[in-house]
Image (tube, rainbow, N blue to C red):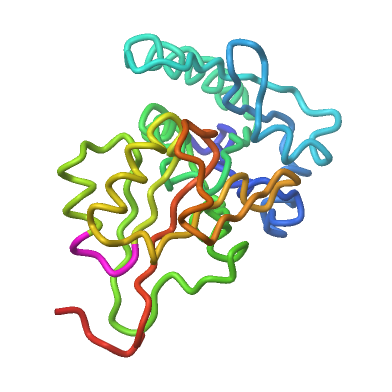
């Protein structure tokens, strides 16, 4: 293992290239090989964010089909791990780009599982979408003794309902086609007044909606989230 290359999981942040850390930039400038998730059509958001630091790099796109069936998705990770392992075994360092943070709902986690037992690995944390959205809305997520729950929009109604009822602050990630259902649950649980809706945080297309009534009740984009933040005295302890 000592003669092999190092695998880097590099968080490139939520979208704004200026939000990459100094360490992420240094690693990207130093490695000869970069890999990143890409759609079957070739779109690669993580690469787009880090593009200015990738000149002259050998690139390994990781084709990720957009489907619920984990079979083809796992095959994609298996194939990518094989290609990356070949580079590492030849002594070349490889950086895997990941939007947001590599270990916060990050695709890097699946490659780490496949490669960490064979090669040295270093993870460079990145700014995640929840932090970026809170910053965009200038809304403190949690203070004092409050609790924050992060949950994907794909969770079923009962899980989302209990989360909204029992947590001071909730981040609901990647609403997409679930947006109408989420709006109904937010009304039902009395959390409408606590809700911010943010699309494309930190990107040129960033959109912030602070009035619940202004959030469209139609399916929306994947790169968005709801922040549900308890209002009132932040020094109160949770019951």
Left or right of 157 in this view: 224: right
Answer with the quarter of the image where residue 230 lies: bottom left
Answer with the quarter of the image where residue 42 lies: top right
For the point 67% across and 49% down, the residue is 206
Quadrant where the C terminus is found in the figure: bottom left
For the point 32% across and 65% down, the residue is 148
- Looking at the rendered structure, the number of numbered marks drawn on it comes to 0
Give coordinates of residue 65: x percent, y percent.
48, 14
Left or right of 158 in this view: 98: right
Toward the front, the furthest residue is: 213
Which of the pair 145/95 is nearer the observer?
145
Give coordinates of residue 81: x percent, y percent.
48, 20
Answer with the quarter of the image where residue 43 lies: top right
Left or right of 232 in this view: 60: right
Which of the pair 46/112 is nearer the observer?
46
Give coordinates of residue 38: x percent, y percent.
60, 21
Q: Is residue 117 above or below residue 165?
A: above
Give coordinates of residue 75: x percent, y percent.
40, 11
Q: Is residue 109 above or below residue 101?
A: above
> Is residue 186 covered in magenta?
no
Specify start and end residues of the magenta stretch as a single range. Answer: 165-169
For the point 75% across and 46% down, the residue is 204
Which of the pair 96/173 is nearer the observer?
173
For the point 69% across and 53% down, the residue is 20
């Amino acid at each position: 293992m000592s003669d092999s290359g190092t695998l880097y999981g590099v968080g490139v942040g939520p979208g704004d290239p200026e939000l990459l850390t100094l360490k992420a930039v240094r690693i990207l400038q130093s490695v000869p090989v970069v890999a990143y998730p890409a759609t079957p059509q070739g779109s690669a958001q993580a690469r787009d964010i880090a593009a200015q630091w990738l000149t002259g790099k050998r690139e390994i796109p990781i084709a990720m089909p957009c489907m619920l069936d984990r079979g083809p998705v796992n095959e994609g990770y298996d194939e990518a791990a094989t290609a990356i392992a070949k580079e590492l075994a030849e002594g070349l360092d490889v950086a895997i780009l990941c939007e947001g943070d590599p270990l916060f709902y990050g695709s890097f986690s699946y490659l780490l599982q496949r490669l960490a037992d064979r090669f040295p690995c270093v993870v460079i944390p990145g700014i995640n979408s929840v932090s970026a959205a809170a910053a965009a809305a200038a809304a403190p997520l949690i203070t004092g003794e409050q609790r924050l729950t992060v949950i994907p929009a794909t969770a079923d109604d009962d899980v989302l309902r209990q989360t909204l009822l029992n947590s001071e602050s909730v981040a609901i990630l990647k609403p997409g086609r679930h947006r109408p259902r989420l709006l109904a649950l937010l009304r039902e649980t009395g959390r409408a007044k606590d809700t911010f809706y943010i699309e494309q945080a930190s990107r040129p297309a960033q959109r912030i909606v602070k009035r619940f009534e202004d959030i469209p009740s139609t399916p929306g984009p994947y790169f968005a989230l709801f922040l549900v933040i308890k209002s009132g005295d932040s020094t109160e302890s949770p019951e």
